[in-house]
């Protein structure tokens, strides 16, 4: 927002739908930069941080969470109307999140299994990303989002350029860090080859396989990777779970899960 | 060191022995010069290159098992320190860092860009293998060999002290012997270690190396130890087996840019980039900018990138290598082919990292073999000395069978021939005679295991007499004579055979040879033009060829009766069917001279290079050996210098009346 300058700070709102609030917390976790952020942005709506409410229009709206309940649909459309730039943040808002695992299941059966009074719960049969309902201007991936990418996005909005958010394989980050590939060296599963970077290979750095929380790479070869995981002796259920985790409803993970579901049904 | 100073002959011959227990003294001596030692150490289930404080950090007693997509460490049966092959870390990590700040920029009243002064640590690389020294040399050429140089690389490379180690074992993924980079270290080191059971045979390659070795508690090695050091490296070579056929791989790949395998391998490839990041020579990078929130100051960092990244070849209007197959092809052809054009060598040293660290187990050796199979070295047959070369003498052969091809053309199958005829080549001819009939030149139309076929048009006295013979009759033969079709010049290309009328006869043996070696050619086609359907030669063979997958056959006739369902028109009309890149065509043309002229013009207008068109010329031949003068064609005797010529060798004699 190059034209806004210093005098008119952009009005920022942070909103949430079905989500755990972890992405909003990532904003609050930017402790070293918070003072600079509030000096440059006018954060007028942020229920996680303050009970002060302020109606739109907003320059930037950060939206966390998936569209999961009937009232979310109107709410996100209204937010879109109020937002000059709408940014979907996190795996739920960009891919449907972990709650989208129900998209392959019997919604009523899930509801009955979890709640004593399922009739009190109003939810949609599918949890869907924000972009299925309204136009999204920018996305930040991850569960939760990466603070560095969030700062880069805010900086880009202020400076008036596109954010430089690369979409590489997580493997690139591992290799630059010198992390030994656990798939090759130990045989453990990792979603890194088909997952978008941005976390600086956080999980592999701590000796855990990538969970795919940043979602599928654009045109990533998820199909081949699912075959590779099956070929290494894993049962389809396990591979299904690897893909269906945080971002399974995003393509091409979604197609892989559907295929694996068919394979599961056959066995 | 970038170039190791040539050791003096005495220094080169000089060797020392360091007991196993004293290896720590080497680490200490190097550290004593102010260098940090980087060497093999175990981390996360692999032997990586990282800082070594003492000999205890080295992986003594461990070995690795590597295969495509798999690496495992296991306890070794001995206590050797270097008893494994290369791990996941390429040394480029320390000469060409994965993340390197290259500039800062500031905006105040004006703009300013500053380049940081390289902050180069003083390092020693311990345990550098032969393939890795070759890789450092390749990056020297990439970064320092051209007009523009990478000064950060130069500083790091110059500062590095190299302690090389001879490999004492190899992995299934190793192929240094195929790339000519190992297993033995031949130079490029300051100190070279060869590990034996009891310790290390040491050689030095620079004064710096000699100075370090002088501080060590060494002794003179025994003859047995020196011999064992040599044997140890040779044993690795034996362990690795036959090298892959890499000869001409750069040219072989250039011929295969449209191979269907590119799409097949791309279906498996997940484009994670692990091959390129693990590769010790891959040098692609991208830069990223980080700015403060008001955009007044920023920092530029260079990062390792990969040509497999979907954004790597993108521009505002789209992606130059949009498909995975394009990106895989880019990597493989750069590494094994176009690298030669840019840097004068292969970009591959055969370390095998791209195979081991590929999570979907793609083995570059298998891809190369499938995409650009080796063209077997051309075995030049022993030059066949013609029998009965002298015009008056003949070798006797027996007529085995006789077959009418058309109303006036007949094929004689001769057997009991002199072995020299069996060693003849498609395109050559014989002189054949009967008592009382002068010898006539006839092309060999077919080579059989026990004889040859001659296809003869009955137009003169001798030919009429020949076609009226009965099986069992004896004839006189001289030959085989003349030049033959240079089949190997069509290897890797589209072989196109163009025949007119009885011109198919000298081409029949060529077609047989092409079909027998069909996998050496991009494609094989026969275009055959005949005056009428009835005048087609070898109709059974044409039908068999048409039915086979190895050759495409197209036939046209000038005049057709109601029975004919095929094409009508001169042979050049068939050229419309050519859909491939004609610069990759090698053509073989025989027929009446007018037909050959039209065909050659047609081929050239399609883009076939003139030096890739071969023709067989007909002239009056009496002696067959260049002594009678009948068959002269400008400066050539067609019988001896021909009948097969490359078009460009004939120059403007080919298309000239009255020559």
Image (cartoon, rainbow, N blue to C red):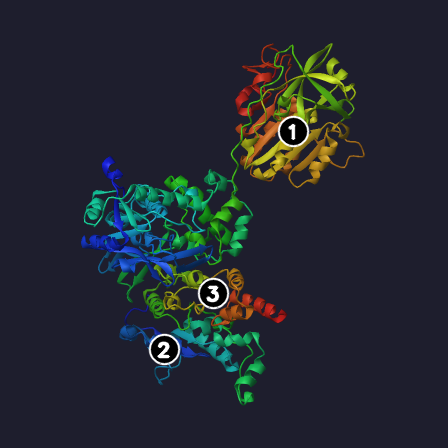
Answer with left or right where residue A120 lies relative to residue A79.
right
Viewer-side label of 2, 1: 1
State whether discs 3 and 1 lie on one chain. Answer: no
Q: Position of residue B345 (x, y in %)?
A: 39, 40
Q: Position of residue A228 (x, y in %)?
A: 51, 61
Helix, strand or loop under label 2:
helix
Whether residue B115 is visible to the viewer of this picture, yes or no, is no
Residue at (48% x, 47% y) in the render: B365
State whether discs 2 and 1 lie on one chain. Answer: no
Label ID, residue B294: none
Q: Badge 3 is on which residue?
A: A216
Of residues A231 and B304, the one drawn nearer to the viewer in this rendering: A231
Helix, strand or loop under label 3:
loop
Which residue appears farthest toward the right when viewing the image? B562
Of residues B173 and B542, the one drawn nearer to the viewer in this rendering: B173
State whether discs 3 and 2 lie on one chain. Answer: yes
Q: Badge 1 is on which residue?
A: B509
Q: Chain of mark 1?
A: B
Q: Chain of mark 2?
A: A
Residue at (44% x, 70% y) in the render: A213
3D distance between C-alphas at marks 2 and 1: 80 Å
Label ID, residue A25: 2
Answer with left or right where residue B260 lies relative to residue A60.
right
Q: Is residue A222 above or below residue B424?
A: below
Viewer-side label of 3, 1: 1
Helix, strand or loop under label 1:
helix
The local crowd at label 2, few if under 14, some if 14 to 19, many if 20 or more residues have their Cα within 10 Å, is some
Q: Position of residue B396 (x, y in %)?
A: 69, 17
Residue at (45% x, 72% y) in the render: A91
Q: Earlier in the sequence, mark 3 or mark 2?
A: 2
């Amino acid at each position: 927002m190059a034209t806004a300058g210093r005098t008119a700070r952009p009005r920022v709102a942070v909103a949430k739908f079905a989500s755990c609030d972890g992405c909003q917390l990532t904003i609050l976790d930017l402790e070293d930069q918070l003072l600079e952020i509030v000096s440059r942005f006018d954060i007028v709506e942020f229920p996680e941080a303050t009970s002060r409410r302020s109606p739109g229009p907003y320059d930037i709206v950060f939206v966390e969470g998936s569209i999961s309940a009937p009232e979310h649909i109107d709410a996100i459309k209204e937010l879109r109307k109020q937002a000059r730039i709408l940014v979907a943040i996190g795996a739920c808002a960009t891919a449907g999140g972990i709650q989208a695992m129900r998209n392959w299941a019997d919604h009523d059966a899930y509801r009955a299994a979890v709640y004593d009074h399922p009739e009190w719960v109003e939810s949609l049969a599918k949890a869907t990303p924000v972009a299925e309902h309204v136009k999204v201007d920018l996305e930040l991936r991850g569960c939760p989002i990466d603070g560095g990418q969030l700062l880069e996005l805010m900086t880009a909005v202020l400076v008036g350029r596109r954010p430089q958010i690369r979409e590489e394989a997580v493997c690139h980050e591992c290799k630059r860090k010198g992390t030994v590939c656990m798939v090759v060296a130990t045989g453990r599963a990792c979603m890194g080859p088909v997952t978008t970077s941005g976390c600086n290979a956080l999980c592999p750095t701590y000796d855990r396989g990538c969970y795919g929380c940043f979602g599928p790479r654009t045109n990533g070869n998820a199909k081949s990777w699912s075959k590779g995981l099956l070929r290494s002796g894993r049962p389809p259920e396990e591979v299904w779970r690897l893909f269906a985790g945080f971002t399974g409803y995003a393509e091409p993970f979604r197609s892989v899960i559907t295929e694996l579901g068919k394979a599961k049904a056959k066995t | 060191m970038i170039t190791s100073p040539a050791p003096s002959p005495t220094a080169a011959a000089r060797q020392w022995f360091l007991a196993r227990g004293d290896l720590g003294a080497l680490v200490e001596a190097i550290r004593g010069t102010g260098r940090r030692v980087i060497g093999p150490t175990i981390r996360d289930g692999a032997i990586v290159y990282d800082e070594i404080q003492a000999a205890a950090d080295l992986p003594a007693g461990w070995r690795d098992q590597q295969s495509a997509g798999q690496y495992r460490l296991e306890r070794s049966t001995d206590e050797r320190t270097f008893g494994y092959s290369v791990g996941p870390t390429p040394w480029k990590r320390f000469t060409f860092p994965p993340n390197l700040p290259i500039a800062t920029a500031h905006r105040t009243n004006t703009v300013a860009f500053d380049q940081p002064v390289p902050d180069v640590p003083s390092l020693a690389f311990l345990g550098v293998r032969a393939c890795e020294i070759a890789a450092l040399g390749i990056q020297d050429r990439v970064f320092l060999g051209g007009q523009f140089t990478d000064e950060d690389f130069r500083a790091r490379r110059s500062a590095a002290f190299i302690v090389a180690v001879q490999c004492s074992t190899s992995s299934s993924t190793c192929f240094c012997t195929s790339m000519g980079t190992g297993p033995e270290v031949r130079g490029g080191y300051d100190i070279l270690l060869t590990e034996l059971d009891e310790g290390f045979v040491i050689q030095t390659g620079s004064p710096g190396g000699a100075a370090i070795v002088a501080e060590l508690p060494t002794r003179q090695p025994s003859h047995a130890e020196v011999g064992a050091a040599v044997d140890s490296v040779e044993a690795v070579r034996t362990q690795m087996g036959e090298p892959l056929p890499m000869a001409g791989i750069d040219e072989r790949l250039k011929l295969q840019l449209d191979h269907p395998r590119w799409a097949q391998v791309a279906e498996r490839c997940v484009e994670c980039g692990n091959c390129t990041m693990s590769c010790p020579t891959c040098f692609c990078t991208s830069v990223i900018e980080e700015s403060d929130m008001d955009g007044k100051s920023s920092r530029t960092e260079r990062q390792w990138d990969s040509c497999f990244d979907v954004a790597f070849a993108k521009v505002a209007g789209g992606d130059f290598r949009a498909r995975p197959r394009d990106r895989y092809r880019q990597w493989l052809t750069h590494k094994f082919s176009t690298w030669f054009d840019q840097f004068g060598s292969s970009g591959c040293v055969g370390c095998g990292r791209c195979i081991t660290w590929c999570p979907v187990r793609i083995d570059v050796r298998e891809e190369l073999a499938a995409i650009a199979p080796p063209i077997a070295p051309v075995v030049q047959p022993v030059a066949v000395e013609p029998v009965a070369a002298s015009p008056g003498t003949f070798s006797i052969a027996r007529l085995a069978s006789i077959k009418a091809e058309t109303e006036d053309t007949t094929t004689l199958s001769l057997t009991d021939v002199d072995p020299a005829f069996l060693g003849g080549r498609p395109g050559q001819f014989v002189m054949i005679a009967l008592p009382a009939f002068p010898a006539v030149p006839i092309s060999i139309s077919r080579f059989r295991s026990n004889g040859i076929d001659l296809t003869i048009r009955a137009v003169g006295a001798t030919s009429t007499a020949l076609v009226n013979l009965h099986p069992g009759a004896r004839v006189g033969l001289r030959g085989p004579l003349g030049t033959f079709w240079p089949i190997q010049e069509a290897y890797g290309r589209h072989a196109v055979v163009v025949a007119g009328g009885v011109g198919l006869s000298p081409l029949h043996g060529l077609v047989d040879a092409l079909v027998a070696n069909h996998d050496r050619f991009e494609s094989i086609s026969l275009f055959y033009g005949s005056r009428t359907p009835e005048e087609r030669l070898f109709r059974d063979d044409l039908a068999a060829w048409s039915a086979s997958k190895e050759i495409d056959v197209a036939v046209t006739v000038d005049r057709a009766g109601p029975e004919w369902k095929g094409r009508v028109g001169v042979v050049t009309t068939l050229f419309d069917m050519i859909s491939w890149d004609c610069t990759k065509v090698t053509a073989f043309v025989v027929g009446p001279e007018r037909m050959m002229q039209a065909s050659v013009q047609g081929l050239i207008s399609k883009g076939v290079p003139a030096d890739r068109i071969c023709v067989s010329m007909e002239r009056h031949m009496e002696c067959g050996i260049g002594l009678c003068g009948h068959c002269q064609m400008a400066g050539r005797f067609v019988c001896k210098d021909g009948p097969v010529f490359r078009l460009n060798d004939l120059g403007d004699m080919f298309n000239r009346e009255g020559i």
